[in-house]
Each structure stands twice: as C-alpha cells, then as structure tokens.
Image: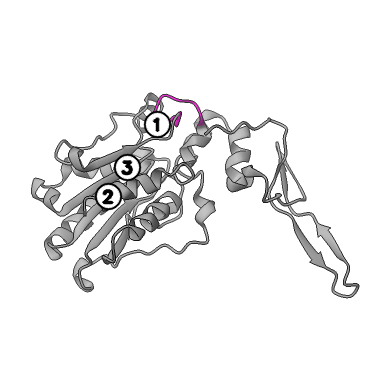
Amino acid sequence: MAVFIGGDDAVPLARRRTTGARSGVKRDVPLVYFRAGQQSARRPDPRNHLSNLPYETIWRVQKLNTRRLASFLGVALATTWASIAVTVAIPSAAAEPCPDVEVIFARGTGEAPGVGGTGQAFVDSLRAQTGGKSVSVYAVNYPASDDFANSIAAGAGDASAHVQSTAANCPNTRMVLGGYSQGASVTDSITETMPPEVADHVAAVAVLGNPKSAYSTSLVGGPLPVISPLYAPKTIDLCVQDDPFCSEGGNWIAHGFYGFTGLTAKAAAFAAGRL
C-alpha cells in the first residue's frame, strides 16, 4: 500500500462542532492543521483515509531527512492504538498461576513502554484465536532508543532472563516470542544466545518489520542478529512490501502498516496454530 503526500499539502486531523454556552448556536471550531513548518487551526476530516495515520508520522515523513527518520523506526503507528490498554505480565513467572500461553514481545523504536501498537494488534489477534486458553503478556523492558546497538543489547538481556525464568518456573507454559522493528532484532538476538533446551518451551516466534536491509545495518553499525536455526522452523518473519528496514525498498510509511495490511493477524494465526 503506497501513500503519496505532496510537500505543501496540509493534512487535516479532525473536525468538531461545539455549541455556544449561551446562544446555543453550533459552529465549527478549527483545531490543528499541519503544513510544512507551521501549525494552523483545524482538525482532520475522519473520512480522509490519511487520518488513519498519526499526523506526526505524515508531517515528519514530509520534512525529516533520512538520518532523522531513523529515530522514528517503529513509531509510525504508535498513537493509533494509544487508547488501548497494554497488559503486562508480572515479571516473576512464579508470582501468579502459570498461564497456558505467554507472549514475550519487544516494541519498536520510540514507542512508549509496553508492547507498542503493532504488538498490541498481534496480541489481540492471538487471544482471539487461542480457543479459551489463558494468555499473559510480558512487554520487554528496554530503552527502544536510537542508540541501536546498546538498546538491542539491553532488550536482549531482559527478554532472555524472562524467557528462561518462565521456562524454569512454568514448564508447561507455551511461549510465543515476538518483536516489531528494533524489537524484532531483540527477539532474533535471544534465539542465538539462550540455552538450547529453552527452545522446547517456545511454541512460535513472530517478527514484524525485522531489520535486515543495508540501511538497517548502517544504523546499528555492525552485523544484525538473525533467527537461530534452532528456532527457524517455528518462526514467521513478515515484511510489508517496500519497507526500507526489512527490505531494500524506499517507502518509509510502509514500516508502520503491519496492522493495516493484516500482517499482525497473519502472524497471530501462525502462532496460534502452533500452540
């Protein structure tokens, strides 16, 4: 799915009507319009298909150069699901009864702590397909910053510790490892470093927008982690067409379209089929 945005086109964000406190006369109240380098007042017409995208993403894609776009890796649709509560598992697997399924998910760069928008879409779809099994969620605790090498290492340390703790304390729990964007690199990394026996407790791995392009490699400043052969048969690795982080494409907006293109649901269906 390609979206073309003219450099000087204003993108409407919303429109509302208000009623005067005394007169009772309804009138349009302009809120926020974004143009290149300025704000004017107006909100978007929700019928405009672009209002499905966060306004900040659209404005920044118009204005920011490639280097600055890197810091927004993974944040394209974070605000789309801002109203959705994120369920985070208690860090100690032994503190609560062991669930049937536990999802360990790492968010993308710049997303707020939790599983992020793409992660939440994946979790919601998986829960709908698990046939009544109890599903808990652990959001990997890491910076998700644009200091990519150190951030990925921190995420891998937290994710690996939690997965190994769950395997030891809840041996019958089936785990699903997942990650979006930088979080996918976190997931790749732990499959390479965890003890081999842990793989027996992992039912599936789902990575979305997994960095592997030449551009992504340049951001990290070294080789990117890849899925271990031990986990490869139970892994689904999905990339939106022309996403420049997981392919050699050049559509920057594509990196935020995993929920809209149905790939989160496809990844969830794959994981559910292995539980």
Q: Residue furthest bottom?
A: 22
Examine the rendering and report whether any part of residue 186 can be seen: yes
The answer to which of marks 1 and 2 sits earlier in the sequence is: 1
Magenta segment's dominant SS is loop
Tell me the CA gap for discs 1 and 2. Answer: 30 Å
Q: Residue furthest left?
A: 197
Which residue position holds label 3?
207
Position of residue 28 measured from the top left corner of the image (x, y, whole percent): 82, 58
Position of residue 143 measured from the top left corner of the image (x, y, whole percent): 38, 50
- In the rendered view, tell whether residue 39 sits above or below residue 124: above
- In the rendered view, tell whether residue 217 sits above or below residue 54: above
Can residue 109 be found in the magenta stretch? no
- Region in magenta: 242-251
| SS type, badge 1 | helix
Crowding at label 1, few (<14), some or many (≥20) Cα neighbours within 10 Å? some
* Quadrant for the C terminus in the image: bottom left
Position of residue 75 measured from the top left corner of the image (x, y, whole percent): 48, 45
Question: Which amino acid type corresponds to the residue marked 3 in the rendered image?
Answer: Val
The answer to which of marks 1 and 3 sits earlier in the sequence is: 3
Which residue position holds label 2?
271
- In the rendered view, tell whether residue 64 sits above or below residue 56: above
Q: Of the residues tagged 1 and 3, which is closer to the observer?
A: 3
Crowding at label 2, few (<14), some or many (≥20) Cα neighbours within 10 Å? many
Of 82 and 269, which appears nearest the observer?
Answer: 269
In-image side of 118 versus 51 (left or right)? left
| SS type, badge 3 | strand
